[in-house]
């Protein structure tokens, strides 16, 4: 006589769903197995916007002598942060509602996935360098506001004014108009009223094949004091994965950060999408929700393939530059 099997409802359902989960994992494994393994081909550095070419030169001098991608990213972004007449990055840039310029920055070291970032940093010019100190000297990932300034001074950075004649004049002209900041305007489902909100983003791979990404900005013009944008948030302003590549974002960070678009872009590249396709899909994910915003994403695979996409900037000459040992070229998006 055959032995009667006693199977509880819980164990039955566990077996059913366990089999379903196992089949889904197996299917995913089969699908991912068709994606070619990516590997670094040569050192390169990519930086966004018009200052990208000169910023790349500063960073590539380090890469071509065998230096680290971390040092290259810091040098590239420092170049943009210290430009005396650059209104969207670094000192002398977009003031907030009370006339003060504050900085956001982030660095991600892909081999260990370590992150360092500062938000609403005050009175310290080289925000990306302070972010690096957060990454290398602490177990934290993000430090903000006056406490970020105190940390920077503790790490040896000079405390100084971030205001110059341009930013002071911009703020005084706005105050004279007697209007409130557009940060209180309705969400941009009809149009994006922001005129200037750019970020420097850099991606580098060194001779060892190590990947690093970073970004820095002084954020939105006339923002509410204390506002932190997308730049210091991993997966929003920038993201990287050593096995895949990296992406950087620029534009209306208050909208873009809600979608973690650089994380999304890197994960889409992991599935086999090209950088351009992945960036476009991440942008479309935002516009599909009805947002009318200005912004762009640039991505690069670990093997050097790169591309980008934008929205709402039909008349904005958004570009990025890439430098390798054999070439330095600027690409429109």
Image (tube, rainbow, N blue to C red):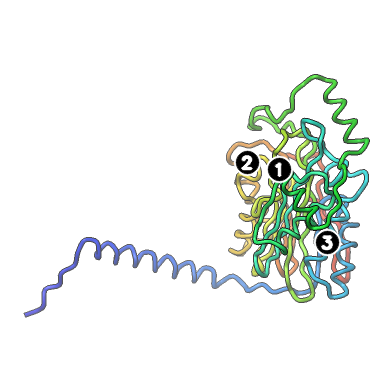
The answer to whether marks 1 and 2 mark residues whose Cβ atoms lie closer than 8 Å is: yes
User: From mark 1 to mark 2, how far is it between C-alphas?
Assistant: 8 Å
* Marks 3 and 1, the one that precedes in the sequence: 1
Q: Residues within 10 Å of mark 1 (few under 14, many from 20)?
A: some
Tell me where residue 29 appears, x and y as whole percent: 49, 70
Quadrant showing the N terminus? bottom left
**Residue situated furthest top in the rendering:** 178
Tell me where residue 57 appears, x and y as whole percent: 90, 62
Frontmost residue, 309 versus 227:
227
Determine which residue is flagged by label 3.
322
User: From mark 3 to mark 1, how far is it between C-alphas?
Assistant: 22 Å
* Marks 1 and 2, the one that precedes in the sequence: 2
Q: Is residue 31 left or right of residue 225?
A: left
Frontmost residue, 112 versus 201:
112
Q: Residue at x 74, y 27 (%)?
A: 181
Q: Which numbered marker is on residue 158?
A: none
Tell me where residue 209 appears, x and y as whole percent: 74, 74
Q: Residue at x 87, y 57 (%)?
A: 55
Determine which residue is flagged by label 1.
311
Q: Is residue 316 left or right of residue 275?
A: right
Q: Residue at x 68, y 64 (%)?
A: 245
**Residue situated furthest left in the rendering:** 1
Q: Residues within 10 Å of mark 2 (few under 14, many from 20)?
A: some
Q: Is residue 310 visible?
A: no
User: Please, what secondary structure does the residue beneath circle 2 have?
Assistant: helix
Q: Residue at x 83, y 25 (%)?
A: 174
User: Please, what secondary structure does the residue beneath circle 3 have?
Assistant: strand
């Amino acid at each position: 006589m055959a032995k009667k099997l006693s199977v509880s409802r819980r164990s039955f359902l566990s077996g059913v769903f366990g089999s379903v989960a196992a089949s889904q994992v197996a299917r995913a494994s089969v699908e991912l197995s068709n994606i070619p393994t990516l590997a670094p081909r040569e050192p390169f550095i990519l930086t966004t916007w018009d200052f990208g070419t000169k910023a790349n030169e500063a960073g590539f001098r380090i890469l071509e002598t065998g230096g680290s991608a971390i040092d290259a990213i810091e040098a590239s972004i420092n170049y943009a942060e210290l430009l005396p007449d650059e209104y969207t990055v670094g000192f002398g840039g977009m003031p907030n509602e009370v006339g003060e310029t504050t900085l956001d920055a982030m660095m991600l070291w892909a081999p260990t996935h370590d992150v360092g970032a500062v938000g609403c940093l005050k009175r310290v010019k080289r925000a990306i360098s302070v972010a690096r100190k957060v990454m290398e000297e602490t177990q934290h990932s993000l430090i903000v506001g006056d406490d970020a300034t105190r940390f920077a001074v503790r790490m040896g950075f000079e405390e100084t004014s971030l205001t110059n004649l341009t930013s002071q004049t911009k703020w005084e002209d706005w105050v004279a108009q007697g209007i409130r900041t557009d940060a209180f305007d309705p969400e941009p489902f009809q149009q994006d009223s922001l005129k200037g909100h750019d970020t420097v983003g850099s991606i580098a791979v060194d001779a060892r094949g190590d990947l690093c990404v970073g970004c820095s900005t002084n954020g939105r013009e006339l923002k509410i004091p204390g506002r932190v944008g997308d730049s210091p948030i991993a997966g929003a302003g920038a993201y990287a994965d050593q096995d895949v590549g990296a992406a950087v974002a620029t534009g209306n960070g208050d909208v873009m950060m809600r979608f973690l678009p650089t994380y999304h872009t890197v994960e889409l590249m992991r599935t086999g999408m090209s950088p351009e396709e992945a960036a476009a899909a991440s942008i479309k994910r935002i516009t599909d929700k009805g947002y009318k915003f200005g912004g762009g994403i640039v991505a690069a695979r670990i093997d050097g393939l790169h591309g980008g996409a934008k929205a709402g900037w039909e008349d904005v000459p958004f570009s990025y530059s890439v430098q390798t040992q054999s070439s330095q070229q600027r690409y429109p998006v």
